[in-house]
Image (cartoon, rainbow, N blue to C red):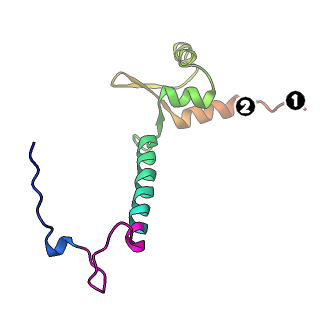
Amino acid sequence: MIFYYSQPSESEVMMNENNEVFTLEDEPLATVVQNMRKGSKWLSAFLESYCPPLDGERYLTDREVAELLRVSRRTLQEYRNNRVLPFILLGGKVLYPESGLRELLEANYRKPLE
């Protein structure tokens, strides 16, 4: 593979008010690059955990519900078989409506004995 290097055009060169070329070591540019990297990490984490709502309802995966309820995924299968938890099948994937889970948990909440 052959790479050709060409000189950047005047519009591609960043210069300060003294006509000096900016480098990554320069404070203003280093700050901008650092902020972009932080923003990129935040955006990546956000997109990784983002669940778009379907018809205004947010749905959770079996992994998320298992973590939330602190049970195994096999236990979730038993809950589905016994119709304990509300769920839908969408394209072969099991999804749990967040509001339905919240209602179920609130209906079955027991205050601890004092």
When asked about the image quadrant of residue 76, the answer is top right
Callout 1 environment at 10 Å: few (<14), some (14 to 19), or many (20+)? few
Residue 48 bears which disc, if any? Answer: none
Determine whether, in the image, residue 41 is placed left or right of residue 11.
Answer: right
Q: What residue is at 55 percent from the left and 13 percent from the top? A: 78
Between residue 31 and residue 46, name the one nearer to us.
Answer: 31
Q: In this view, does 40 lie above or below 12?
A: above
The residue pinned by badge 2 equals: 109
Tell me if residue 51 can be seen. no
The residue segment tinted magenta is 14-30
Secondary structure of the residue carrying tag 2 is loop
Callout 2 environment at 10 Å: few (<14), some (14 to 19), or many (20+)? few
Q: Is residue 68 above or below residue 49?
A: above
Between residue 111 and residue 66, name the one nearer to us.
Answer: 66
Any magenta on residue 25? Answer: yes
Q: What residue is at 40 percent from the left and 54 percent from the top? A: 40
Q: Name the residue type under label 1.
A: Leu
